[in-house]
Amino acid sequence: MSGLGIRKLSVDHMVSMLSGTYISLIKNRIAFREFPSVMLWGPPGVGKSQGVRQIAEKIKNETGKNVRITDVRLLLFNPVDLRGIPTANEDKTLAVWLKPQIFQMDPSETVVNILFLDEITAAPTSVQAAAYQITLDRTVGEHKLPENCIVIAAGNRVTDRSVSYNMPKALANRLCHLEIEGNLSAWHKWAIQNDIHPFVVGFIEYNSSSLLRSEGMELAFPTPRSWEMVSNILNFVSDNMDEVFPMIVGCVGEKTGDLFKTWTEVYKGIPSVEDIFLSGKGDVPAEKELRIALKSAMVRYAKKCKNKELIDNSIKYSCKLPWSFRKQLLQDYIKITEISDIVEANEVYKTAVKDGLEC
Protein backbone atom coordinates (compact mmCIF):
# COMPACT_ATOMS: atom_id res chain seq x y z
CA MET A 1 0.00 0.00 0.00
CA SER A 2 1.32 3.47 -0.88
CA GLY A 3 1.18 6.77 1.00
CA LEU A 4 -1.79 7.66 -1.20
CA GLY A 5 -3.80 4.81 0.29
CA ILE A 6 -3.83 2.87 -3.00
CA ARG A 7 -1.95 -0.06 -4.49
CA LYS A 8 1.45 0.30 -6.12
CA LEU A 9 1.88 -1.48 -9.44
CA SER A 10 4.65 -1.87 -11.97
CA VAL A 11 3.99 -0.50 -15.45
CA ASP A 12 3.79 -4.10 -16.71
CA HIS A 13 1.16 -5.04 -14.14
CA MET A 14 -0.86 -1.91 -14.86
CA VAL A 15 -0.75 -2.46 -18.62
CA SER A 16 -1.76 -6.12 -18.28
CA MET A 17 -4.63 -5.38 -15.88
CA LEU A 18 -6.13 -2.41 -17.72
CA SER A 19 -5.68 -3.77 -21.24
CA GLY A 20 -7.29 -7.03 -20.13
CA THR A 21 -10.19 -5.08 -18.61
CA TYR A 22 -10.82 -2.96 -21.71
CA ILE A 23 -10.49 -5.96 -24.04
CA SER A 24 -13.05 -7.83 -21.93
CA LEU A 25 -15.45 -4.87 -22.08
CA ILE A 26 -15.08 -4.71 -25.86
CA LYS A 27 -15.58 -8.43 -26.43
CA ASN A 28 -18.61 -8.50 -24.14
CA ARG A 29 -20.01 -5.34 -25.75
CA ILE A 30 -20.12 -3.47 -22.44
CA ALA A 31 -19.95 0.32 -22.73
CA PHE A 32 -16.76 1.96 -21.47
CA ARG A 33 -18.90 4.35 -19.40
CA GLU A 34 -19.74 1.38 -17.13
CA PHE A 35 -16.09 1.24 -16.04
CA PRO A 36 -14.62 4.15 -14.02
CA SER A 37 -12.10 6.53 -15.55
CA VAL A 38 -8.58 5.68 -14.36
CA MET A 39 -5.99 7.94 -12.71
CA LEU A 40 -2.33 6.88 -12.88
CA TRP A 41 -0.09 8.38 -10.19
CA GLY A 42 3.70 8.21 -10.16
CA PRO A 43 7.01 10.07 -10.29
CA PRO A 44 8.18 11.78 -13.49
CA GLY A 45 9.56 9.41 -16.10
CA VAL A 46 8.33 6.18 -14.51
CA GLY A 47 6.48 5.14 -17.68
CA LYS A 48 2.85 6.22 -17.24
CA SER A 49 2.49 7.70 -20.74
CA GLN A 50 4.32 4.79 -22.33
CA GLY A 51 2.06 2.39 -20.46
CA VAL A 52 -1.00 4.00 -22.04
CA ARG A 53 0.54 3.48 -25.48
CA GLN A 54 1.16 -0.17 -24.62
CA ILE A 55 -2.48 -0.54 -23.56
CA ALA A 56 -3.54 0.86 -26.93
CA GLU A 57 -1.27 -1.61 -28.75
CA LYS A 58 -2.63 -4.58 -26.79
CA ILE A 59 -6.23 -3.56 -27.46
CA LYS A 60 -5.44 -3.23 -31.16
CA ASN A 61 -3.75 -6.62 -31.33
CA GLU A 62 -6.47 -8.46 -29.39
CA THR A 63 -9.57 -6.87 -30.93
CA GLY A 64 -8.44 -5.77 -34.39
CA LYS A 65 -9.82 -2.30 -33.76
CA ASN A 66 -8.03 0.89 -34.72
CA VAL A 67 -6.99 2.53 -31.44
CA ARG A 68 -6.45 6.28 -31.41
CA ILE A 69 -4.96 8.19 -28.48
CA THR A 70 -5.90 11.83 -27.96
CA ASP A 71 -3.24 13.26 -25.64
CA VAL A 72 -4.53 16.32 -23.76
CA ARG A 73 -2.25 18.36 -21.49
CA LEU A 74 -4.69 20.18 -19.21
CA LEU A 75 -1.90 22.47 -18.02
CA LEU A 76 -2.15 24.23 -21.40
CA PHE A 77 -5.89 24.87 -21.10
CA ASN A 78 -8.15 27.36 -19.40
CA PRO A 79 -11.46 25.97 -18.10
CA VAL A 80 -13.39 27.63 -20.91
CA ASP A 81 -11.08 26.07 -23.53
CA LEU A 82 -12.48 22.63 -22.76
CA ARG A 83 -15.96 23.81 -23.65
CA GLY A 84 -14.96 25.30 -27.00
CA ILE A 85 -15.37 28.64 -28.75
CA PRO A 86 -18.72 30.46 -28.42
CA THR A 87 -20.43 31.62 -31.59
CA ALA A 88 -23.95 32.67 -32.64
CA ASN A 89 -26.48 30.13 -33.83
CA GLU A 90 -27.94 30.30 -37.32
CA ASP A 91 -30.56 32.96 -36.55
CA LYS A 92 -28.20 34.78 -34.16
CA THR A 93 -30.51 34.42 -31.16
CA LEU A 94 -28.43 32.02 -29.03
CA ALA A 95 -24.80 31.22 -28.34
CA VAL A 96 -23.53 27.80 -29.35
CA TRP A 97 -20.16 26.28 -28.56
CA LEU A 98 -17.88 24.91 -31.23
CA LYS A 99 -16.39 21.60 -30.12
CA PRO A 100 -12.60 21.78 -29.47
CA GLN A 101 -10.51 19.92 -32.05
CA ILE A 102 -9.17 17.54 -29.38
CA PHE A 103 -12.65 16.08 -28.95
CA GLN A 104 -13.27 15.42 -32.65
CA MET A 105 -13.16 11.64 -32.29
CA ASP A 106 -14.26 8.90 -34.67
CA PRO A 107 -17.34 7.23 -33.12
CA SER A 108 -17.41 4.22 -35.48
CA GLU A 109 -17.53 0.59 -34.32
CA THR A 110 -14.11 -0.22 -35.76
CA VAL A 111 -12.36 2.41 -33.63
CA VAL A 112 -11.45 2.70 -29.94
CA ASN A 113 -10.56 6.19 -28.72
CA ILE A 114 -8.41 6.79 -25.65
CA LEU A 115 -8.68 10.28 -24.17
CA PHE A 116 -5.45 10.62 -22.18
CA LEU A 117 -5.52 13.53 -19.74
CA ASP A 118 -1.78 13.65 -19.03
CA GLU A 119 -0.21 15.79 -16.31
CA ILE A 120 -3.64 16.50 -14.85
CA THR A 121 -2.16 17.33 -11.44
CA ALA A 122 0.00 20.05 -13.02
CA ALA A 123 -3.14 21.92 -14.06
CA PRO A 124 -4.53 24.56 -11.67
CA THR A 125 -7.44 23.46 -9.52
CA SER A 126 -9.91 25.44 -11.64
CA VAL A 127 -8.91 23.43 -14.72
CA GLN A 128 -9.01 20.16 -12.81
CA ALA A 129 -12.53 21.07 -11.76
CA ALA A 130 -13.48 21.43 -15.41
CA ALA A 131 -12.44 17.78 -15.86
CA TYR A 132 -15.21 16.57 -13.52
CA GLN A 133 -17.72 16.23 -16.35
CA ILE A 134 -15.21 14.44 -18.57
CA THR A 135 -14.30 11.77 -16.02
CA LEU A 136 -17.77 11.00 -14.68
CA ASP A 137 -20.42 12.23 -17.11
CA ARG A 138 -18.20 11.91 -20.21
CA THR A 139 -19.37 15.32 -21.35
CA VAL A 140 -17.67 18.65 -21.98
CA GLY A 141 -20.24 21.41 -21.77
CA GLU A 142 -22.78 20.49 -24.44
CA HIS A 143 -20.41 18.02 -26.08
CA LYS A 144 -20.46 14.28 -25.35
CA LEU A 145 -17.57 11.87 -25.68
CA PRO A 146 -18.38 9.02 -28.08
CA GLU A 147 -19.38 5.66 -26.62
CA ASN A 148 -16.13 4.12 -27.89
CA CYS A 149 -13.94 6.40 -25.74
CA ILE A 150 -11.77 5.28 -22.78
CA VAL A 151 -10.74 8.02 -20.34
CA ILE A 152 -7.36 7.73 -18.58
CA ALA A 153 -5.68 10.50 -16.57
CA ALA A 154 -2.13 10.66 -15.23
CA GLY A 155 -0.07 12.93 -13.04
CA ASN A 156 2.71 13.32 -10.52
CA ARG A 157 2.30 13.24 -6.77
CA VAL A 158 2.77 16.43 -4.73
CA THR A 159 5.76 14.71 -3.07
CA ASP A 160 7.55 14.31 -6.43
CA ARG A 161 8.78 17.93 -6.36
CA SER A 162 7.39 18.56 -9.83
CA VAL A 163 4.66 21.08 -10.70
CA SER A 164 1.67 19.54 -8.96
CA TYR A 165 -1.52 20.67 -7.27
CA ASN A 166 -3.60 18.71 -4.80
CA MET A 167 -6.46 17.01 -6.60
CA PRO A 168 -9.89 18.21 -5.42
CA LYS A 169 -11.74 15.49 -3.51
CA ALA A 170 -14.76 15.79 -5.80
CA LEU A 171 -12.57 14.92 -8.80
CA ALA A 172 -10.59 12.23 -6.96
CA ASN A 173 -13.82 10.44 -6.04
CA ARG A 174 -14.72 10.15 -9.72
CA LEU A 175 -11.60 8.12 -10.56
CA CYS A 176 -10.12 4.67 -10.05
CA HIS A 177 -6.61 5.39 -8.70
CA LEU A 178 -3.47 3.34 -9.42
CA GLU A 179 0.07 4.25 -8.35
CA ILE A 180 2.88 3.30 -10.73
CA GLU A 181 6.30 2.48 -9.29
CA GLY A 182 9.66 1.78 -10.84
CA ASN A 183 10.17 -1.97 -11.11
CA LEU A 184 13.55 -3.37 -12.11
CA SER A 185 12.45 -6.70 -13.60
CA ALA A 186 9.60 -5.12 -15.59
CA TRP A 187 11.94 -2.42 -16.90
CA HIS A 188 14.61 -5.00 -17.79
CA LYS A 189 12.12 -7.00 -19.86
CA TRP A 190 10.88 -3.85 -21.60
CA ALA A 191 14.45 -2.68 -22.27
CA ILE A 192 15.42 -5.94 -23.95
CA GLN A 193 12.31 -5.91 -26.14
CA ASN A 194 12.75 -2.26 -27.15
CA ASP A 195 16.42 -2.12 -28.21
CA ILE A 196 17.70 -0.21 -25.20
CA HIS A 197 21.48 0.05 -25.60
CA PRO A 198 23.44 -2.72 -23.80
CA PHE A 199 25.51 -0.10 -21.94
CA VAL A 200 22.29 1.05 -20.26
CA VAL A 201 20.83 -2.43 -19.70
CA GLY A 202 24.05 -3.67 -18.13
CA PHE A 203 24.51 -0.59 -15.97
CA ILE A 204 21.01 -0.78 -14.49
CA GLU A 205 21.44 -4.50 -13.80
CA TYR A 206 24.73 -3.77 -12.03
CA ASN A 207 23.52 -0.62 -10.25
CA SER A 208 19.75 -1.02 -9.86
CA SER A 209 19.34 2.04 -7.63
CA SER A 210 20.15 4.22 -10.67
CA LEU A 211 16.98 3.25 -12.53
CA LEU A 212 14.88 5.85 -10.74
CA ARG A 213 16.32 8.37 -8.32
CA SER A 214 15.74 12.03 -7.55
CA GLU A 215 18.97 13.92 -6.96
CA GLY A 216 17.93 16.94 -4.91
CA MET A 217 17.27 20.09 -6.91
CA GLU A 218 19.24 19.02 -9.98
CA LEU A 219 17.50 19.47 -13.32
CA ALA A 220 18.69 16.12 -14.73
CA PHE A 221 18.16 12.88 -12.81
CA PRO A 222 17.78 9.19 -13.69
CA THR A 223 14.34 7.78 -14.55
CA PRO A 224 13.22 5.10 -17.01
CA ARG A 225 12.38 7.94 -19.41
CA SER A 226 15.79 9.61 -19.13
CA TRP A 227 17.55 6.25 -19.59
CA GLU A 228 15.59 5.75 -22.81
CA MET A 229 16.90 9.17 -23.88
CA VAL A 230 20.46 8.05 -23.08
CA SER A 231 19.92 4.86 -25.10
CA ASN A 232 18.70 6.89 -28.08
CA ILE A 233 21.82 9.02 -27.93
CA LEU A 234 24.03 5.93 -27.87
CA ASN A 235 22.05 4.15 -30.62
CA PHE A 236 21.48 7.05 -33.01
CA VAL A 237 24.27 9.56 -32.35
CA SER A 238 27.36 7.72 -31.05
CA ASP A 239 28.35 5.23 -28.38
CA ASN A 240 31.68 7.00 -27.97
CA MET A 241 31.25 8.33 -24.46
CA ASP A 242 33.83 11.09 -24.91
CA GLU A 243 31.77 12.52 -27.77
CA VAL A 244 28.34 12.36 -26.17
CA PHE A 245 29.10 12.59 -22.44
CA PRO A 246 27.74 16.14 -21.95
CA MET A 247 24.41 14.98 -23.40
CA ILE A 248 24.41 11.91 -21.16
CA VAL A 249 24.94 14.13 -18.12
CA GLY A 250 22.18 16.37 -19.44
CA CYS A 251 19.77 13.43 -19.23
CA VAL A 252 20.69 11.68 -15.95
CA GLY A 253 22.77 14.23 -14.03
CA GLU A 254 26.47 14.51 -13.34
CA LYS A 255 26.74 12.04 -10.47
CA THR A 256 24.92 9.25 -12.29
CA GLY A 257 26.57 10.23 -15.59
CA ASP A 258 30.04 9.79 -14.08
CA LEU A 259 29.11 6.36 -12.73
CA PHE A 260 27.68 5.38 -16.10
CA LYS A 261 30.76 6.50 -18.02
CA THR A 262 32.99 4.46 -15.70
CA TRP A 263 30.73 1.45 -16.25
CA THR A 264 31.02 1.63 -20.04
CA GLU A 265 34.77 1.10 -19.75
CA VAL A 266 33.99 -2.45 -18.61
CA TYR A 267 32.90 -3.40 -22.13
CA LYS A 268 36.49 -3.05 -23.38
CA GLY A 269 37.38 -6.15 -21.35
CA ILE A 270 34.73 -8.58 -22.60
CA PRO A 271 35.50 -11.22 -25.28
CA SER A 272 34.40 -10.64 -28.87
CA VAL A 273 30.63 -11.15 -29.02
CA GLU A 274 30.79 -11.66 -32.78
CA ASP A 275 33.32 -14.52 -32.35
CA ILE A 276 31.12 -16.14 -29.70
CA PHE A 277 28.16 -16.22 -32.08
CA LEU A 278 30.24 -17.38 -35.06
CA SER A 279 32.09 -20.21 -33.31
CA GLY A 280 30.51 -20.82 -29.92
CA LYS A 281 33.94 -20.28 -28.40
CA GLY A 282 35.55 -17.56 -26.33
CA ASP A 283 37.15 -16.77 -23.01
CA VAL A 284 34.94 -16.60 -19.93
CA PRO A 285 35.30 -13.44 -17.82
CA ALA A 286 35.95 -14.06 -14.15
CA GLU A 287 34.63 -10.76 -12.78
CA LYS A 288 30.91 -10.23 -12.16
CA GLU A 289 30.98 -6.82 -13.86
CA LEU A 290 32.40 -8.31 -17.06
CA ARG A 291 29.85 -11.11 -17.08
CA ILE A 292 26.95 -8.66 -16.73
CA ALA A 293 28.37 -6.52 -19.52
CA LEU A 294 28.92 -9.58 -21.73
CA LYS A 295 25.37 -10.80 -21.12
CA SER A 296 23.83 -7.47 -22.13
CA ALA A 297 25.97 -7.38 -25.29
CA MET A 298 25.05 -10.97 -26.22
CA VAL A 299 21.33 -10.32 -25.76
CA ARG A 300 21.52 -7.28 -28.04
CA TYR A 301 23.49 -9.24 -30.68
CA ALA A 302 21.01 -12.15 -30.57
CA LYS A 303 18.07 -9.81 -31.08
CA LYS A 304 19.70 -8.24 -34.12
CA CYS A 305 21.05 -11.38 -35.82
CA LYS A 306 17.90 -13.59 -35.54
CA ASN A 307 19.98 -16.48 -36.97
CA LYS A 308 19.41 -19.97 -35.59
CA GLU A 309 22.96 -21.23 -36.12
CA LEU A 310 24.53 -18.16 -34.54
CA ILE A 311 22.14 -18.19 -31.59
CA ASP A 312 22.73 -21.90 -31.05
CA ASN A 313 26.49 -21.18 -31.02
CA SER A 314 26.02 -18.52 -28.36
CA ILE A 315 23.94 -20.90 -26.25
CA LYS A 316 26.70 -23.50 -26.62
CA TYR A 317 29.16 -20.91 -25.29
CA SER A 318 26.82 -20.17 -22.37
CA CYS A 319 27.59 -23.63 -20.97
CA LYS A 320 30.97 -22.23 -19.95
CA LEU A 321 29.33 -19.56 -17.82
CA PRO A 322 28.40 -20.09 -14.16
CA TRP A 323 24.92 -21.53 -13.72
CA SER A 324 23.26 -18.28 -12.60
CA PHE A 325 24.58 -16.23 -15.53
CA ARG A 326 23.74 -18.94 -18.07
CA LYS A 327 20.18 -19.11 -16.76
CA GLN A 328 19.82 -15.31 -16.79
CA LEU A 329 21.16 -15.12 -20.34
CA LEU A 330 18.73 -17.73 -21.64
CA GLN A 331 15.83 -16.16 -19.75
CA ASP A 332 16.67 -12.86 -21.44
CA TYR A 333 16.84 -14.59 -24.83
CA ILE A 334 13.36 -16.03 -24.36
CA LYS A 335 11.95 -12.52 -23.72
CA ILE A 336 12.88 -11.56 -27.31
CA THR A 337 9.85 -12.36 -29.46
CA GLU A 338 11.88 -12.54 -32.67
CA ILE A 339 14.05 -15.43 -31.44
CA SER A 340 11.97 -17.13 -28.73
CA ASP A 341 11.07 -20.07 -31.01
CA ILE A 342 14.75 -20.70 -31.79
CA VAL A 343 15.65 -20.64 -28.11
CA GLU A 344 12.79 -22.91 -27.00
CA ALA A 345 13.88 -25.53 -29.57
CA ASN A 346 17.48 -25.54 -28.30
CA GLU A 347 18.39 -28.59 -26.22
CA VAL A 348 20.65 -26.63 -23.88
CA TYR A 349 17.79 -24.25 -23.10
CA LYS A 350 15.47 -27.15 -22.35
CA THR A 351 18.03 -28.66 -20.01
CA ALA A 352 19.42 -25.56 -18.36
CA VAL A 353 16.21 -23.60 -17.82
CA LYS A 354 13.23 -25.92 -18.03
CA ASP A 355 14.78 -28.90 -16.22
CA GLY A 356 17.23 -26.94 -14.06
CA LEU A 357 20.19 -29.19 -14.99
CA GLU A 358 23.74 -28.51 -16.10
CA CYS A 359 24.62 -28.57 -19.82
Image (cartoon, helix red, strand yellow):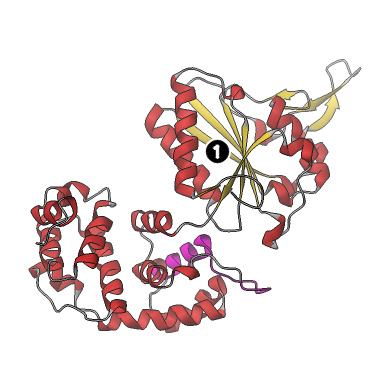
Q: In this orientation, does residue 81 appear?
A: no
- With 132 as the anchor, is 306 left or right in this view? left
- With 35 as the anchor, is 229 left or right in this view? left
Neighbourhood count class around disc 1 (C-alpha, 10 Å): few under 14, some 14–19, many 20 upward: some
Identify the image quadrant of the C terminus: bottom left
Residue on which the image places disc 1 = 69
Measured as percent of width and height from the top left, residue 103 is found at: 66, 32
Q: Residue at x 26, y 68 (%)?
A: 295
Residue 219 on the magenta segment = yes
Q: Looking at the image, which is closer to me, 110 or 348?
A: 348
Q: Looking at the image, which is closer to me, 119 or 351?
A: 351
- With 94 as the anchor, is 228 left or right in this view? left
Q: In this orientation, does residue 301 appear?
A: yes
Q: Residue at x 70, y 46 (%)?
A: 120
Kind of element beneath mark 1: strand
Position of residue 27 relative to residue 175, above or below, is above
Residue 347 on the magenta segment = no
| Segment tinted magenta in the rendering | 215-234
Tag 1: residue type?
A: Ile
Tell me where residue 194 sits by quadrant: bottom left
Measured as percent of width and height from the top left, residue 126 is found at: 83, 43
Measured as percent of width and height from the top left, residue 20 is found at: 44, 32
Most distant residue in the right direction = 93
Q: Residue at x 17, y 55 (%)?
A: 356
